[in-house]
Amino acid sequence: MTAVGIDAIEIWTGKLKLDLAETFAPAKGEAPEKYTKGLGLEASSFPDTYEDIVTMGANAAKRLMDRKGLSPDDIGRIDVATESAFDNSKPVSTYIAGCLEEVYDGDFHHANKGERKFACVAGTQSIDDAYNWIKAGRHRGRSALVIATDTALYARGDPGEATQGAGAVAMLVSEDPSVVELSTHQGYGSADETDFLKPNQQFPSVDGKRSVQVYLARMREALTDFESVAGRIHSDDYAYFPFHTPFPGMVRKAALLGFRHMTRDTEIEDELATEIGRQPREEEYEDWEAYEDAIRSYMDALKETDTYNDWYARAIDPTLTLARRVGNWYTGSVHVARASALKTAAETGRALSGEKLLVGSYGSGAQAEIHSETIMDGWREEVEAFDIDEQLARRYDLSFEEYGRVHDAHNHEKERELEEFTVPSGEFVFTGWGRMNERK
Ligand code: HMG
């Protein structure tokens, strides 16, 4: 069977930066450590006023197509995953295809285009759709362009304000992929939830604390469902665990739960027993509350052990290095986590071909999906082509007052001021709602 998976990845960050410790924390009267240590974030990316989900997505896609030497004829499908769409009819993929047709010979007239929505999990769902399309043999030898693009804004003053971010990840899904092969092993945890939603509104209504619990509950269900397909998983089966990262502190919570689950009834639990005791078993407790207290104490002890911290440093922390600097990109977030892990591996000379990733995607509303991927021989060359470090270094560092103006500029209910903080160069720029984006 031909391998199908991700052949290439390109990342485009919004060109502005809000520093959480230096700029946001003092303005909010909060300790910088709340953001840097508590949430695990250093900064958020924002789009300049001439950027939006279309330009960021089109710019990422153009870089990808140029680097891979692709023309529109090579693409049979364009799916855009976003929860920041501004058009309730025309999918964002048509706007992006319009941009790309301005600069390439040929067109996408015979490509199937769509827009996928299920909060942040939609990026992974679009990859699943592309995989199924290729596996079904409907692709005529062509590849699918999947673009996850979002401007993740919260209302000013919302507790979620510290976790904002903006950027796009373009991915090419093909036969014989260079980066990762997707597997048929998947697990889901899905339920009707109302902790984070945007019914006819741009900024989300959020019950932040509850959203953290819902994330953990759905991920736990997805893991159990995944194991029912793939069999019991262990902490050393996977090189990295890229998870949806609304903020790194969220992944820290999920990782601790996951590690406890994966090490139960294993040699690792036996080894840890001398240090912190065995994991509590439900049947040993008279009531649920006592059992939960015991679990909490076990987890508090577990997170102080070298065994856990070594695994975390090896398998989780490398997935968070980009998220720390850019914030939540919603649909792109888990794909930033994968890219971040592979980039760290390339920088540290780690050999990865043939190793596996356990990818945990999540979207509010709510659905978690866990699937496995196998790293392919061409991964290093693809990842070394990233220019994300240069992009991050070039970001304009906003003052708090400028941040307010940028937030207003992207607020659909306000008049859009096209005051620019950076200078566009050889890229698509926003020229007005519903109009063709131009290239400057
Ligand atoms: P908050 O109330 O501002 O913060 O909101 P907090 O008081 O809970 O503090 C955050 C952490 O910092 C805590 O750590 C504090 O202890 C710590 P924890 O106890 O949780 O481990 N802290 C400090 N640490 C060191 N030094 C200090 C200090 N002060 C405090 N001085 C909240 C936090 C997450 C609720 C907020 O940011 C929020 O509402 N975020 C938006 C919602 C969100 O991201 N939810 C995540 C799960 S849902 C999801 O991932 C889906 C999503 O991406 C959307 C989609 O799918 O479309 C959001």
Image (spheres, grey):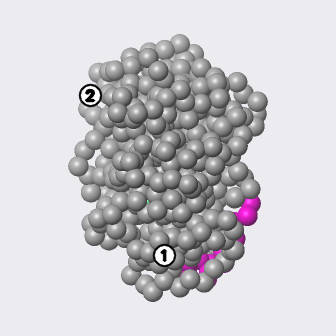
Q: Is residue 100 above or below residue 229?
A: below
Q: Nearer the viewer, mark 2 or mark 1?
A: 1
Q: Which residue is mark 1?
A: 410
Query: 353 and 120: which one is in front?
Result: 353
Using the image, tell me which numbered label, if any, was put on residue 131. Answer: none
Q: Is residue 56 above or below residue 270?
A: below
Q: Which residue is mark 2?
A: 286
Q: Quadrant of the C terminus?
A: bottom right
Query: 234 and 407: which one is in front?
Result: 407
Horizontal placement of 3 versus 220: left or right?
right
Amino acid type, label 2: Glu
Q: Is residue 255 above or below residue 423?
A: above
**Can you see residue 218?**
yes
Q: Quadrant of the N terminus?
A: top left
**Can you see residue 275?**
no
Q: Secondary structure at mark 1?
A: loop
| Residue 202: % across, % down | 37, 70
Horizontal placement of 186 versus 268: left or right?
left
Q: Residue at x 28, y 41 (%)?
A: 190
* Crowding at mark 1 (Cα within 10 Å: few <14, some 14-19, many 20+): many
Residue 396 part of the magenta-drawn span:
yes
Q: Residue at x 64, y 24 (%)?
A: 377
| Residue 83: % across, % down | 39, 59
Q: Secondary structure at mark 2?
A: loop
Start-end of magenta stretch: 393-407
Q: Earlier in the sequence, mark 2 or mark 1?
A: 2
| Residue 205: % across, % down | 33, 66
Magenta highlight: main SS:
helix
Estimate the spatial distance between the alpha carbons at disc 2 and disc 1, rounded to whole Å.
54 Å
